Image (tube, helix red, strand yellow):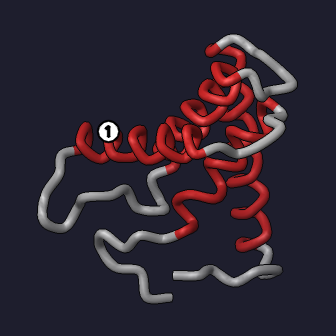
């Protein structure tokens, strides 16, 4: 892999976008959902402190995935295209649980040698 600072990588978008979509069982992915994702990602980076070598979160910043997935799920609910309408707190808990579970499984597979570490 050749990740470098400020690399725009689809690995930042797809996991969180789909986590938000799946957690509310959205019927579609809209432009509004993509925009709220981008705005949330930008705010996350701003909170961390923008600098020449940091204008976008890295793939290791898992809390960015949580924040963006939450924003996407809430936007789907607001737009009336979700099949589920959990409260903000319920949605946040579901997203955290799913992401932690996925990370744990991934780490277990790497430790056991079944998959290679990418970097």
Q: Residue furthest bottom?
A: 1
Q: Residue at x 23, y 61 (%)?
A: 54
Q: Is residue 14 above or below residue 53?
A: above
Q: Which residue is mark 1?
A: 43
Q: Is residue 45 above or below residue 40?
A: below
Q: Nearer the viewer, residue 77 or 116?
A: 77
Q: Residue at x 57, y 66 (%)?
A: 11
Residue 103: x, y in percent? 68, 54
Circle 1 sits in a helix, a strand or a loop, which is it?
helix
Q: Residue at x 18, y 46 (%)?
A: 49
Residue 47: x, y in percent? 25, 37
Q: Residue furthest left?
A: 52
Q: Residue at x 76, y 80 (%)?
A: 115
Q: Is residue 118 above or below residue 11?
A: below
Judged left or right of residue 47, residue 29 is right
Q: Nearer the viewer, residue 58 or 28?
A: 28
């Amino acid at each position: 892999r050749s990740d470098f600072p400020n690399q725009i990588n689809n690995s930042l978008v797809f996991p969180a976008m789909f986590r938000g979509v799946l957690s509310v069982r959205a019927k579609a992915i809209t432009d509004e959902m993509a925009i709220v994702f981008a705005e949330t990602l930008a705010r996350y980076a701003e909170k961390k402190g923008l600098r020449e070598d940091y204008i976008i979160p890295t793939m290791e910043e898992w809390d960015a995935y949580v924040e963006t997935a939450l924003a996407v799920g809430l936007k789907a609910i607001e737009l009336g295209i979700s099949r589920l309408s959990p409260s903000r707190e319920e949605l946040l808990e579901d997203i955290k649980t799913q992401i932690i579970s996925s990370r744990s499984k991934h780490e277990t597979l790497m430790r056991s040698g079944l998959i290679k570490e990418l970097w």
